[in-house]
Image (cartoon, rainbow, N blue to C red):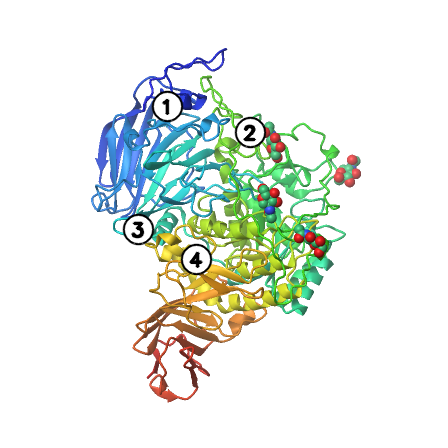
Amino acid sequence: MMFSLRRFGLHGGVLCIASMSASVANAYSMNVANCPGYTLGSLVESSNGLTARLTLTGPGCNAFGQDIAELTIQVAYQSSSTLRVKIFDTAQEQFTIPESVIARPSAPAESYTGISDLVFNYDPSPFAFWITRRCEPDAMPLFDTRISSLPQTPIAPLNSSDPSTAFDAFPLIFEDQYLQVASALPYDTNIYGLGEAIASSGFRRDMGTNGGTGTIQTNWNRDIKDPIDENMYGSHPIYMEHRFNEITNKSTSSGVLLLSSAGADIFLQSPPDSNVSFIEYRMIGGILDFYFFSGPTPSDVIAQYGAIIGYPMWQPVWGFGFHLCRWGYSSIWDVEDVVARMRAANIPLEVQWTDIDLYHAHRDFTTDPVNFPGDEVARFVSELAANNQYYIPIVDAAIAVAVNSTDMYDPFTSGVEQDVWIKNPDGSLYIGEVWPGYTVFPDWFSANVQSFWTEALKNWSELGVGFSGIWLDMNEASSFCGYSCGTGANFSALVPLDESGRVLTAWPECYNATKWGSSGNMDIDGVSTNSCTTNSTTTTTVVKRDIAAGQEAGFYINDPPYKIHNGFGPLSNHTLATNATHQGGYVELDVHNMFGLMEEKTTHLALKELFPKQRPFLISRSTFPSSGKWTGHWLGDNYSKWQYMYLSIQGILQFQIYQIPMVGADTCGFYDNTDEELCTRWMQLSAFTPFYRNHNTLGAIPQEPYRWPSVAEASRTVIAIRYALLPYWYTLFANASLAGLPTVRALFYEFPDEPELFAIDRQWLMGRDILVTPVLTPGATTVEGIFPGRGGVIWRDWYTHAVVNATPGDLTTLDAPIGHINVHIRDNAALLLHHCPAYTIAETRAGPYALLVSLSKTGSALGTAYLDDGISPPPTPNRTVTFDVANSVLTIKTSGTYVVESKLAMVTILGAAGPCVVTVQGQLVSTWSYSASAEELVVYDLAIDLGEDGTNISWQ
Ligand SMILES: *[C@@H]1O[C@H](CO)[C@@H](O)[C@H](O)[C@H]1NC(C)=O
Ligand SMILES: *[C@@H]1O[C@H](CO)[C@@H](O)[C@H](O)[C@H]1NC(C)=O
Ligand SMILES: *[C@@H]1O[C@H](CO)[C@@H](O)[C@H](O)[C@H]1NC(C)=O
Ligand SMILES: *[C@@H]1O[C@H](CO)[C@@H](O)[C@H](O)[C@H]1NC(C)=O
């Protein structure tokens, strides 16, 4: 398949093509066809891996840049499960992510070379490598860059107007502005991750099989209303493969991280008539720094990735409460009224947020003197605090430029004095445009930025904005114009953008405004009256790109020759220009995708300094590998549509892979108007996701949960369940921060050998034990869901405790009237709960605990709970409590130093046979009841100290 193409100039006149299949007659193939590859030499083995030299084998092809003649490859066995393959230019001129931005573990003290799960194999010329499992040397490799392994037939462009979507197999290409490497994958294998993405194919990525178009995942962070199948706010070049062996009916998972911040296209494709699929990386800079993870389970892969880039931050416990926000509050008194109405409707509100309405002239670190005066904001925040409630304001990434000499705006002027702003190549301030007009942007590489940013947050807090956490927005970074649009401009000529007159008129699918009017009110009274069907799928469109020739000399900072599929076209469109410069000699082209990450780290460290006794709380839009160490994430600016509610599930599952487990969608939808039915279903759904916030945009009808009786009622019900489950959520998050384990799981994580689960993204598991099956369509009174385990697992209804009569391996229809969301408990589980969910998390935690046990067919159950004060930054006193049931005895084991004040008041055992006697610590008790129909034993009026080891309860 190596076509013997001659090179033809693309600049001058007619393009001649000789002896070449029409399907590959395009500029992309032209450019890469003659790339010679590399030859490996000077190999030195060490106890921990190897180092070698890669030398360009022939004349450079200069496909989309200049070939680099000398490379170094380092292979390091990081642990028994993780293998690193790093290929870089020996001169080290290419951009490499500094350890100061993402700290990585150093080489281990002990050698894993002969014992690691993974093995590095290579061909010296043309250089290619492949990764195998030590225990399966003859199986198809996990990753394989050999030309002979890749599809042998060239693929015609996926889109005839986009030549860059053609493929052929070539050796490694490593140029200053273009790197390309491909790996064969099993045909139609299961790939997850590679975001940030909203994929029309669902959580499982489209491999170009079964009628799919394949995947083009572009990594170039951008500010865009949640798009489908295009690049968006964050970049996460990590994927998990779940490989199913149809002969053994067993699966194994593995993972691949390409740790690079370069703009990139990552393709997943399967050629027609081929028996292999492949992944191809095309990057416009940087180096190749691969990490391979051996799994073998999905949760193992996720945890192994976390061990490299860092486990997620510890969340303060109040972060799991219900959050409320909108853009378009008219004043602090308006916000105060919303808080009061939530209380009057008895809908728990833990955290009230404000958007940019708070600001004076749209400027960060200010308050509007008329509508949000600082002393009134301070009073409001202190009243929240007195009620155990919290407040979070927004911080936009760009900082307004002072427009004239009498314009006093300290964050700008002190930033100039401290030299913290991003520059133009000539050293002048780089000036873009965002909400406040012309703006500068913090240079997170600058020497003084940490102290500057900490000071700015401190001053704001002293102005009255008593925040408990920070919301970071617009940090892709967003700029409303292209390039350095404000440099040299007359600053006073540009006034802040005023959108105050905006009125949105679009509605959810199936909402009939003629019938129901403009309130969103559908008079739902227990039953939905909506009957219409929505489009469940969307189509993928491949955007037209141009391919520039790469033969020019020099380096194209503003316009790299290979055009990645950025949805905004030119890389500098709607963001910082790629030639903007940072301290340390970095250019925006190389570090663009890390702006959000670096802001998150700086903000997190600022909050730690300002409030050393508290865990920071952050939610941010633009993310990158290791962002979870510093922040949580919301899924961005979605729409009030049924489709987007469904799509939020894949987003939450993706961010578990990315090690940013604190994630959630704008509940009830952001853009456009919501309606009563959609908001009911969405409030229900999000109650079982980590970050639970209802957020709305300017100009849309209000959507606070008290606006409609059905939404209010459903919200009270699900928030009570969420707060009851808080010890369980909290334990899942402790296991994320301690060991990198995913909090929300796709069904196949727990049941890896059941292929019918591999594409399920309309249901999810909270940890191991709670299965959520939300309604995702209007007008529904039932929902279909699958119950994993193929009949070998007992699933019990959360509300009735009845055993589900599920169809093994197939969909089961469940009742789902408007006020009801289906939640089921797995067997062999013991869940510590709060017995009395209250208005706030603090009041809930002050009450007693309950234990809910769901026995397996053999009468066993096991569960653990991690407990601490929920506020202090670890290390802090903590306690692990284990609940173990066997032979009709529950034994409670406990260890740690945290003193648990609340007592365990009630124990419920599901699946227990009818007992005659119940004992607690060997003493007969009469405080129990038994329901034979539900097989449910309840032991009540207990006061068990969870700090006391060895407590037991038995029933005979
Ligand atoms: C300077 O800018 C401020 C803020 O926009 C404005 O109120 C003031 O009138 C301007 N002063 C002059 C002298 O232009
Ligand atoms: C919307 O409601 C009006 C009034 O009830 C009705 O005439 C019309 O057919 C409805 N439209 C749709 C698309 O159902
Ligand atoms: C379904 O898709 C079609 C074609 O794109 C569109 O015209 C129609 O409005 C969509 N219907 C709904 C309910 O979204
Ligand atoms: C820049 O992006 C905007 C969308 O915000 C788009 O309309 C415009 O065409 C893009 N510019 C270019 C040169 O592609």
In the rendered view, does 409 fall on the left or right side of 893?
right
Residue under pointer 1: 68
Residue occupied by mark 2: 570
Ligand 4 within 8 Å of the CB at mark 2:
yes
Q: Residues within 10 Å of mark 3 (few under 14, many from 20)?
A: some
| Other-residue count near label 2 (Cα within 10 Å), few / some / many at <14 / 14–19 / ≥20 | some
The CA span between labels 4 and 1 is 43 Å
SS of the residue under disc 2: loop
- For label 4, count other residues whose C-alpha is less than 10 Å away and answer few (under 14), some (14-19) or many (20+): many
Tell me which amino acid carries mark 4.
Thr
- In three-dimensional space, the C-alpha distance between marks 2 and 3, rounded to whole angstroms, equals 42 Å
Residue topped by disc 4: 743
Q: Tell me which corner region of the image, top left, top right, bottom left or bottom right, holds residue 579.
A: top right
> What is the distance, in whole Å, between disc 1 and disc 2 at their CAs?
25 Å
Three-letter amino acid code at disc 2? Pro
Can residue 169 be seen in this snapshot?
A: yes
Residues at discs 4 and 1 in contact (Cβ within 8 Å): no
Q: Is residue 544 above or below residue 213?
A: above
Task: Look at label 1 and name its amino acid.
Answer: Ile
